[in-house]
Image (cartoon, rainbow, N blue to C red):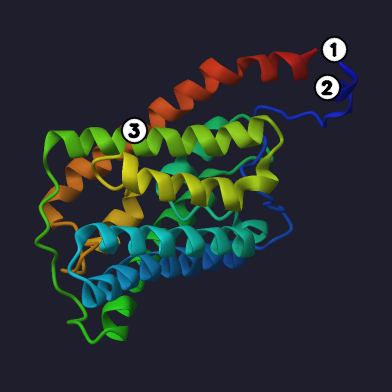
């Protein structure tokens, strides 16, 4: 073992995804998840509306939408990560619960049962807020069909990559880079996945409430959410495949 390895802090299998002090009351953590997810969806939907009002070029619209999301998500993770872990995503919450289920300090079922509804409620509220800011109808079901098979495959890839990134950072003690790394990944996945990387069941549900650039038809939600859950499982499997050596090293 090198001197660098000896000096590196040990990372256990159940290490939380971000600074999530147990001293922070659950109410504060749930509020952070609700507000953070609402702000994220407001950024995604609002920037999409703004982009379509400024240009008819779909490429420029997507560029504006993705850049706003990158900056907004990075700031939100930096701000709220120390409070709740800045999941803003039921797949991330479920993945953390599963990976730390044997650890008394890990995320418990009570937290999951509080986080997930808060994320969904926040996402819906964020979409409505964005529509209100731009004078759109507050609730108008999206008509953007996204049910094609290649789009569903894109969601598996996008979500698996997100889970692999977050848990890989945790395994290698690099979570301090999460605001930049996660935001950068989502920004790139806007472009390299066919689905433009929703990668988040709560955000997907919120985006069904707006018939604007970032919307998704309610009929497309079951497929997207199902593939996002599959992507989460694939991502966790990749974490085990790639980072098993970290667990073995810390067990010695």
Residue 47 locus on image (x, y percent): 34, 70
Q: Is residue 36 left or right of residue 248?
A: left
From the viewer's perspective, is 207 left or right of 100? left
Crowding at dot 3, Cα within 10 Å, few <14 / some 14-19 / many 20+, comes out as many
In depth, the one of 103 and 66 nearer the eye is 66
Q: CA distance from mark 3 to mark 1?
A: 35 Å
Circle number at residue 157? 3
The residue at which mark 1 appears reads as 1
| Residue 200, percent from left and from top | 36, 49
Given contact means CB atoms under 8 Å apart, are the residues at marks 2 and 1 in contact? Answer: yes
Q: Residue at x 56, y 44 (%)?
A: 108
**Where, quadrant-wise, is the N terminus in this rendering?**
top right
The residue lying at 45 percent from left, 39 percent from top is 162
The answer to whether residue 215 is left or right of residue 10 is left
**At 66% from the left edge and 63% from the top edge, which residue is drawn?**
25
- Residue 183 visible to an observer of this rendering: yes
Instruction: Give whichever of 79, 230 is nearer the camera.
Output: 79
Looking at the rendered structure, which numbered label has been put on residue 5?
2
Question: Which residue is located at x 55 percent, y 39 percent?
Answer: 166
Within 10 Å of the Cα at label 1, are there few (<14), some (14-19), or many (20+) other Cα atoms?
few
Mark 2 is surrounded, within 10 Å at the Cα level, by few (under 14), some (14 to 19) or many (20 or more) other residues, namely few
Q: Helix, strand or loop at disc 1?
A: loop
Measuring from the top left, give residue 130's x and y in whole percent.
Answer: 32, 77
Q: Earlier in the sequence, mark 3 or mark 1?
A: 1
């Amino acid at each position: 073992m090198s001197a660098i390895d000896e000096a590196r802090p040990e990372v256990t299998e159940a290490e939380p995804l971000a600074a999530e002090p147990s001293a922070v009351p659950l109410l504060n953590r749930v509020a952070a998840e609700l507000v953070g997810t609402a702000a994220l969806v407001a950024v995604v939907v609002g920037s999409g509306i703004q982009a379509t009002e400024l240009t008819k070029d779909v490429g420029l619209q997507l560029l504006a939408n993705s850049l706003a999301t990158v900056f907004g998500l990075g700031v939100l993770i930096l701000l709220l990560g120390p409070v709740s872990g800045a999941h803003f995503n039921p797949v991330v919450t479920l993945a953390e619960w599963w990976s730390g289920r044997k650890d008394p300090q890990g995320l418990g079922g009570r937290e999951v049962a509080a986080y997930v509804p808060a994320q969904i409620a926040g996402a819906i509220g964020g979409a409505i807020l964005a529509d209100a800011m731009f004078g759109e109808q507050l609730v108008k079901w999206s008509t953007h069909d996204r049910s094609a098979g290649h789009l569903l495959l894109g969601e598996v890839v996008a979500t698996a990559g997100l889970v692999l990134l977050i848990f890989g950072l945790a395994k290698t003690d690099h979570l301090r880079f999460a605001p930049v790394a996660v935001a950068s990944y989502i920004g790139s996945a806007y472009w390299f996945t066919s689905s433009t990387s929703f990668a988040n069941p709560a955000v997907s549900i919120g985006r069904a409430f707006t018939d604007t650039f970032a919307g998704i038809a309610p009929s497309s939600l079951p497929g997207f959410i199902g593939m996002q859950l599959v992507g989460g499982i694939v991502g966790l499997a990749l974490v085990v495949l790639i980072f098993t050596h970290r667990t073995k090293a810390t067990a010695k």
